[in-house]
Amino acid sequence: MRWADGFIAVDWGTTNRRAYMVDAQGSCSSEFEDEKGILSVPSGGFEAAVSEIRERMGDKPMLLAGMVGSNRGWIEVPYAFCPAGLGDLARQLKWSPDGTAALVPGVAYLDERADVMRGEEVQILGAAAAGEIPADCLVCHPGTHNKWIEVRDGRIRSFRTVMTGELFNLLRDRSILSDLLQADVEPSEAFRDGVRRGVAGAALTAELFETRARVLLGRLKPEDGGPFVSGLLIGHDLRVGLEQRSGLPVVVMGRPELTELYAAALEEASVEAVEMDGERAFLAGARKIVELIE
Amino acid sequence: MRWADGFIAVDWGTTNRRAYMVDAQGSCSSEFEDEKGILSVPSGGFEAAVSEIRERMGDKPMLLAGMVGSNRGWIEVPYAFCPAGLGDLARQLKWSPDGTAALVPGVAYLDERADVMRGEEVQILGAAAAGEIPADCLVCHPGTHNKWIEVRDGRIRSFRTVMTGELFNLLRDRSILSDLLQADVEPSEAFRDGVRRGVAGAALTAELFETRARVLLGRLKPEDGGPFVSGLLIGHDLRVGLEQRSGLPVVVMGRPELTELYAAALEEASVEAVEMDGERAFLAGARKIVELIE
């Protein structure tokens, strides 16, 4: 199997995976997404899960990124440490026993703080290498674990993770606020009010309960509860992330439904940001890494 | 049924209930606790759930406090508004159709902020009326929803709820931090470190993820992860609560296993606090309300 004849790139996360067939010309000729994240793969089941992708997309070499390279995934790939560029990722790939699949390392940051990522690095470094984002910028990458990534000279210099998405999901699925959080969130005035309070440093753990009290006492419409809580969490997130800005331009990268909310929140905080589709960035990163293999 | 011949007092919360038989002399002659919180009672099932308590404890009048008086409980009792004293609770009791059970109102606070409680008011006002806490003090009441209550002249003047316990439980039961949070928390050095960071205003949603990263990168022992996260959440809680202190003595009231952790955290924040058992306070409050009925 030759990479130059086309390959399959997979962004394989905790709860879902997305696979793309990249043809010999570098175009994405087919793709699929399903919920077979690493937590749904039984112990010893990764060979079968990988074969299943090849059955669907073709018998091609595979580049696997994300939690599939974690200690809960298929083959553990040690982190590349900051500052990390695409060349570091390519040099530190781990290969499957039969040599037909390469797993991309995650990136770790370690000084007084400690942080880790797996999957976002391909998008960020890919977009930078392809010239789609500035070589020096601050990338906001919303998701279950939102990341704020300082990019310098096209490499990841530092980053910080904020547990915003996971907290929102926990609150929506299981908390006393659950009733209020079922509807999709739009960047409404209630959302923007939450953002303002979060950015201003309101006490998150108190404001969450107060949202319920305001609804019970008729001070907030139930339908505004969800957008307010979402805005509050994202506002806190911005407060953390923008500390690392130091004048850099801001890019919001990821799934469009999330980048839209974060872009609206950044606007509320008077920060101009450009949005970038995470899928496009992932494909750019995968192609660049494969070029470096050959 | 005469209250003077003894009565049953029930602290009936969301996930559990505790019932006490108070005899004619005012002593607690028997008690039980089970997990039949209001969420486990089917629609229309409260008469049966109340009868079951009488079958176990005797055919006596009942005083019911807590979420049983909420819109998800048996009979909704409108809140008493701050400032609220025991007399307000007694005047605003709601009676069961047969007149043998009285439900205690919760307390609401409303100005620029909004807040609600159901259950804690009986403990706090009872302890104040019995002279077990100062007539002017700040009560910290840890639980699923921790409350900080400003007591003035033996009445509840204001309070603020922090969602600490519920957040900790969500993180322990369902989050990426779950593995780290299974062991019981002791007030260890890791706990105190978390408290210090929380009180100092560390970014909660970022520090939570960083705890995992520190463990993955060998900077924190896995067994210290849980106490650190608990300390971090409680530290944030103290930061909110102590804003309302303005020189008042601090009392920590509730379940001993929780008051111990909060007292250790307050010590770390250089705040002296006395601990008070919540059960004893509840019985004091129930007796006082019953005296006011007659």
Image (cartoon, coloured by chain):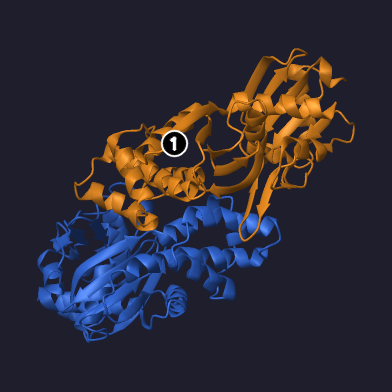
Chain colours: A blue, B orange
Instruction: Find residue B153 and report its image quarter.
Output: top right
Instruction: Find residue A167 and report its image quarter.
Output: bottom left
Q: Nearer the viewer, residue A102 or B176?
A: B176
Q: Is residue A135 visible?
A: yes
Q: Residue at position x 53%, y 73% from top? A: A192
On-image quarter of the N terminus of chain B: top right
Residue A275 drawn above or below residue B48:
below
Q: Residue at position x 89%, y 36% from top? A: B97
Q: Nearer the viewer, residue B241 or A258?
A: B241
- In this image, A20 relative to B20: left or right? left
Q: Is residue A8 visible?
A: no
Extreme right residue here? B98
Element type where label 1 sits in the image? helix
Q: Residue at position x 77%, y 36% from top? A: B87
Q: Position of residue B42 (x, y in %)?
A: 73, 40
User: Tag 1: residue type?
Assistant: Tyr
The residue tagged 1 is B262
Residue B62 drawn above or below residue A131:
above
- In this image, B248 relative to B233: left or right? right
- In this image, B43 relative to B99: left or right? left
Residue A137 drawn above or below residue B120:
below
Q: Position of residue A190 (x, y in %)?
A: 58, 71
Q: Position of residue A135 (x, y in %)?
A: 20, 82
